[in-house]
Image (tube, rainbow, N blue to C red):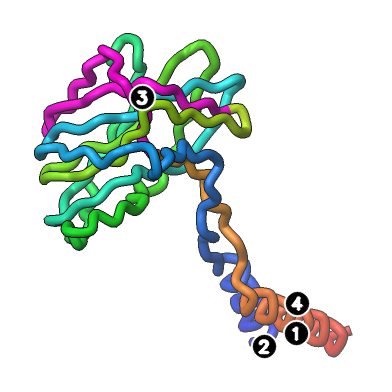
Amino acid sequence: MNRMFLTAISLAALGTVHSAQALVLFESVPDQSTGLVEFANAGSTVVGRLTVSDAETIGGIGVLNNLENGANLKFFIADATTGTLLYVSAPKAFAAETGQNLNLTYKVSDGLSFTFLPGTTYAVGSIADDVSYTFIDPVQTNAALGFTSLSGNLTVSGYAAPVLDTATNCCSVGFELLDAPQAVPEPGSFIVLAAGVLGLGVARSRRD
C-alpha cells in the first residue's frame, strides 16, 4: 500500500509544472524623443514590417500602444508584399488605460507558434475594436538575433476581417517578438519527487 501511494505521489510530481515568463527575442524600439503618437479609430491601425536572415520561430507578439477605453485586440502576422494574412489570433480583452498622458505599454498576445522564413517581408501588429494610440518613428530600425525591423509601416483596417494595405508609409512602429515560454518544474515538485523515489527505495529494501 505504501509503495503504491508513494508511486502515485512521484507521478503527480512529474506532472506538476508551471510556465516560465516568455523571453523577448526582438524589439523594434521607436525613439520616443523623435517620433509621435498617432490616434487610430476602431478597426484601423498602423503595423510594423520585418525580415529575418534565417528561419525564426516565435511564441508570442507584443504591440506598443495605448487603449484608453479598453479594447479587444486581434494580433496578426501577414505577408507584407501580398497582403495575405498568415496568422490571426482570437480576440483578447485589455482593460482601459489612462488616456490623458498616453502611457504606451506592450500588449502581449496569448501563446502562439509561428516561423518566419527568409526571403519574405512580414507585417506584424494588432487591430483593436475601439480607439487606440500607437507610437511611430520616422526613421527607427533595429536588428538583432536574425530579425530586422524596417522603416516604412503598413496600415490594416476592418476588425472583423482585417485587410492589409500593402502601400508603404513613412514610419516604423513599436512591436516585440517573444520566445515560447518553457515549462519548468516547480521547486516543490522536486521535493515531492525525491520523497517518492526515496520511499520506493525504502519499501523495496524492506521487502528484500
Give the Cα separation between the discs numbered 3 and 4.
51 Å
Give the Cα separation between the discs numbered 2 and 3.
58 Å
Disc 2 + disc 1, Cβ < 8 Å: yes
Above or below 23: residue 201: below
Q: What residue type is labelled 1?
A: Gly
The local secondary structure at tag 4 comes to helix
The local secondary structure at tag 3 comes to strand
Q: Name the disc covering residue 123, or none.
A: 3
Of residues 112 and 70, the one nearer the viewer is 70
Identify the residue position indicated by label 1 in the image.
199
Disc 4 + disc 1, Cβ < 8 Å: yes
**Quadrant of residue 197 within the rendered picture:** bottom right
Disc with the residue nearer the chain's start (1 vs 3): 3
- Confirm whether residue 100 shows in the render: yes
Q: Quadrant of the C terminus?
A: bottom right
Disc with the residue nearer the chain's start (4 vs 2): 2
Disc 1 + disc 3, Cβ < 8 Å: no
Identify the residue position indicated by label 2 in the image.
2
In this rendering, position of residue 83 left or right of residue 7: left
Q: Where is residue 108 in the image (x, y as percent from the top left)?
A: 36, 49
- Confirm whether residue 90 shows in the render: no
Identify the residue position indicated by label 4 in the image.
197
Residue range in magenta is 147-174
Q: Nearer the viewer, mark 4 or mark 2?
A: 4
- Residue 150 sits inside the magenta stretch: yes
Q: Position of residue 90 (x, y in %)?
A: 24, 42
Q: Which amino acid does label 3 sit on?
A: Ala
In this rendering, position of residue 15 left or right of residue 205: left
Give the Cα separation between the discs numbered 2 and 1.
8 Å
Q: What residue type is labelled 4?
A: Val
